[in-house]
Amino acid sequence: MQYTAVMFSILLVSSVFTWILIFIASLFILIKASDYFVDSAETIGLHIGLPSFIVGVTIVSIGTSLPELITAVYAVSKNAPGIVVGNAVGSNIVNIFLVLGLASISCRRTLRVTHELIHVDLPLLVGSAFFLAVTIWDGVLTLAEALLYIAGLSLYLLYTIHTEKQSADTAIKETENEPKKREFSWKTIVVLIGSTFFIYLGAVYTVESVIKLSELLNIARAIIAVSVVAFGTSAPELVVSIKAARNGKSEIAIGNVLGSNIFNIFGVMGIAGLFGTLIIPQDILSFALPMMLVATILYFFIAQDREITQWEGGILLLFYIFFIGKLFNLL
């Protein structure tokens, strides 16, 4: 009897370790494939003569959110809605508390932006967060509600295109004309097709590993999604924002988080909701969702004066530590 228990424990540890490795590998493939997809798609878009601002607000902005998006769609097909909602809500928490917090601390000076955020951008962020809260508060996201998310995404993209076009027109007036096309070879098309396949492959095994780990460790899928998966899919935003902050590019560091969070709600939740009704786990409604709303409100008040200090970044990090500690009953 004791021998059987020991063997069971060994097999359990072995299985957990194997699926953890699969999770890490699949998440890495998912993120790297998305990078290659964005690069190759951007090259093709510029080569065929698309305006750079159109490429930026469509190919680049959506492409950087492909890990969350493809993972969400596949999770719905596997009847694992907790992964969808957990990833979207968790990514928004990570982006504000961890990404923005570390970016602020790593910046040599205070993060400052010249763009007036208070008029449209911040209200859009807060509005999207509360729209998510009121639509999933009853524990269900229906097809009709998903269509409203798509409408919100359309409005956001139209606003972004309008804003980017104004910036592009200003830049053209201030600089000499530059070639709009970018040379590419057939290798670029091969990379585009190959990266699309690996994005799907990475999403499949990311979802499968979360399902297996939740069963082996007896942890809710939503908890793994809102913490580990959210951290992994937010890794690109983390790297980009910290690098931008260190190089004095505050606009990118702050805007990257804002745009990603709005798309996570309207885009990821909306598109995933088109493939089936989403049942929202109680773990998300009782703790993760309120924490996301707190993070969004903090972002609003911190960023409305168009600067984020290192001290404010430290407070954001404290909130993230609290969030993870409470999530896994460590505090």
Image (cartoon, helix red, strand yellow):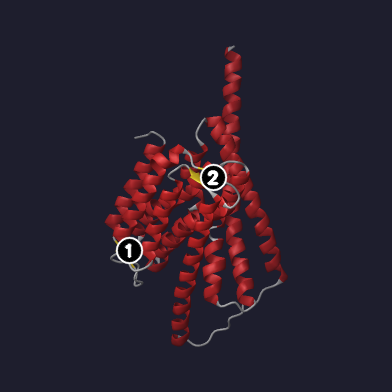
On the picture, is 255 further left or further right than 64? left
**Quarter of the C terminus within the rendering:** top left
On the picture, is 147 further left or further right than 102? right
Tell me the number on the disc at residue 108: 1
Q: Position of residue 44 (x, y in %)?
A: 64, 72
Given residues 165 and 129, the one toward you in this image is 129
Q: Position of residue 64 (x, y in %)?
A: 53, 60
N-terminal label among 2 and 1: 1
Q: Secondary structure at mark 1?
A: loop
Residue 106: image quadrant is bottom left
Residue 20 in sight from this viewpoint: no
Residue 34 in sight from this viewpoint: yes
Residue occupying the point 41% across, 65% down: 255
Q: Position of residue 234 (x, y in %)?
A: 48, 53
Residue situated furthest front in the rendering: 144
Residue type, numbered disc 1: Arg
Residue occupying the point 32% across, 63% down: 108
Given residues 207 and 277, the one toward you in this image is 277
Q: How many marks?
A: 2
Q: CA distance from mark 2 to mark 1?
A: 43 Å
Q: Judge whether 47 appears above or below 228 on screen.
A: below
Tell me the number on the disc at residue 278: 2
Q: Secondary structure at mark 2?
A: strand
Few, some or many residues within 10 Å of mark 2 (<14, 14–19, 20+): many
The mark closer to the camera, 2 or 1, is: 2
**Quarter of the N terminus within the rendering:** top right
Q: Position of residue 29 (x, y in %)?
A: 61, 52
Q: Judge whether 207 appears above or below 40 on screen.
A: above
Residue situated furthest top in the rendering: 1
Residue type, numbered disc 2: Leu
Few, some or many residues within 10 Å of mark 1 (<14, 14–19, 20+): few
